[in-house]
Amino acid sequence: MEFASIPEIDTPALVIDLDAHERNLRRVADYFAARPCDLRPHVKTHKCSTIARRQVEMGAIGVTCAKVGEAEAMADGGITSILIANQVTAASKIQRLAALAGRCELMVALDDVNNARAIGQAATQAGTTVGVLVEIDTGMRRCGLAPDPAQAVAFAKAVLPVDGLRFRGLMGYEGHTVMIEDDAERRAKASEAGRQLGACAQAVRDAGIDVQIVSGGGTGTYDISGDSGVFTEIQAGSYVFMDARYHGIQPELETALFMVSTVVSLARGDLVTLDCGMKSLTHEFGQPPVVSPSGLGPVGLSEEHGRCAIEGGTCDLKLGDQVWLLPTHCCTTANLHDRYWCVRDGRLVGTWAIDARGRFD
Ligand SMILES: Cc1ncc(COP(=O)(O)O)c(C=O)c1O
């Protein structure tokens, strides 16, 4: 893959290859259109209400968010159904959550009865209703109740009578499985997580409680959990861009997000130095590879510089030329930028604001 320089792009810039991005959106939308399971994409990946609206236009039933601030930005951007797939416990955030429920259909995950009561009280005072999903820990060990059906039933029964809340169902994100590279192992572990969540959901149903929603799933498991019969909606996020970490796990999806940087030094002869560093590109999943031009090694990052070795000894680059990198983690990299630069057929066609950028509040 070779990409020519686009001088209108002010680097370091996050660039969307619109054709590849739209093919990803279409592929996953088509997958869910053909099944009795919906897509509620996680917007933590792109943090952009323009992309969220496009996902909804293609059939998504709403969005998933990680934080109240992210959800507020999505509501500001016109999204009308939002799941915060996370615990909200600080008093000030519970107030904002209750207020936000007056602007959209809002749901939140829970694993604590006192937290449920605090949210119910705030919603009652605000004159709103917050939907709740009981979170079950199916192996990720982050948040959620142990996957014990009796405990799930007891929790649902405790939440049901709380004023200001509406019990909607269960959630269990199998995040410990989504990046397992071996297909058979990923399938086995994700299926086991789904089985645990399904057993809890069934027990709650058997107790006579209406379970409308069972939510979970990521890009690495959207097709496993989506086909399991357990989930009613899937929270995949990274499928819109795919990054170096995910690339290969779901080969039907294409890399669609690139970091475009400019050559700032060639003085050493064996090294290319770029204008992107760890303030514009994250590297917790490893050094970003160069996709264009070919012949450059992975990029080591300091604050405002990226350095890569010239493999084979020579290269044709000049100062000011652009180099295209593949982010290793699209979600944390997007959070560093104000806008996406959108490219089609090698030409800049517009920019989109990353309006939930920094909304980890
Ligand atoms: C709660 C939750 N749901 C879904 C996802 C799926 O994201 P992805 O599609 O990027 O794997 C994540 C990722 O961190 C998550 O935390």
Image (spheres, rainbow, N blue to C red):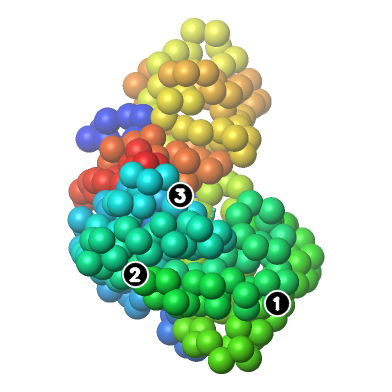
Of residues 331 and 315, the one drawn nearer to the viewer in this rendering: 331
Residue lying at the far top of the rendered structure = 267
Residue 343: percent from left, percent from top: 30, 49
Asked whether residue 322 appears in the rendered view, the answer is no
> Residue at image x 44%, y 77%?
161
**x 64%, y 26%: residue:** 311
Asked if the residue at label 2 sits under 8 Å from ligand 1, the reply is no
**Are dots 1 and 3 in contact, CB under 8 Å?**
no
Residue picked out by circle 2: 164
Residue 121 in sight from this viewpoint: yes
Label 1: state its secondary structure: helix
Q: Is residue 291 left or right of residue 130?
A: right
Circle 2 — which element?
A: loop
Are there few (<14), some (14-19), or many (20+) residues within 10 Å of tag 2? many
Viewport quadrant of the C terminus: top left
| Mark nearer the N terminus (2 vs 1) | 1
CB within 8 Å, label 2 to label 1: no
Frontmost residue, 24 versus 174: 174
Task: For marks 2 and 3, give the CA distance.
Answer: 16 Å
The amino acid on which the numbered mark 1 sits, given as a three-letter code, is Ala
Label 3, ligand 1: CB separation under 8 Å: no
Label 3 near label 2: C-beta < 8 Å? no
- Three-letter code for the amino acid on which mark 2 is drawn: Gly
Rendered location of residue 328, percent (x, y)? 56, 41
Residue pointed to by mark 3: 89
Q: Crowding near pointer 3: few (<14 within 10 Å), some, many (20+)?
A: some
Residue occupying image coordinates x 39% and y 75%: 166
Residue 158, by quadrant, is bottom right
Q: Which mark is residue 150?
A: 1
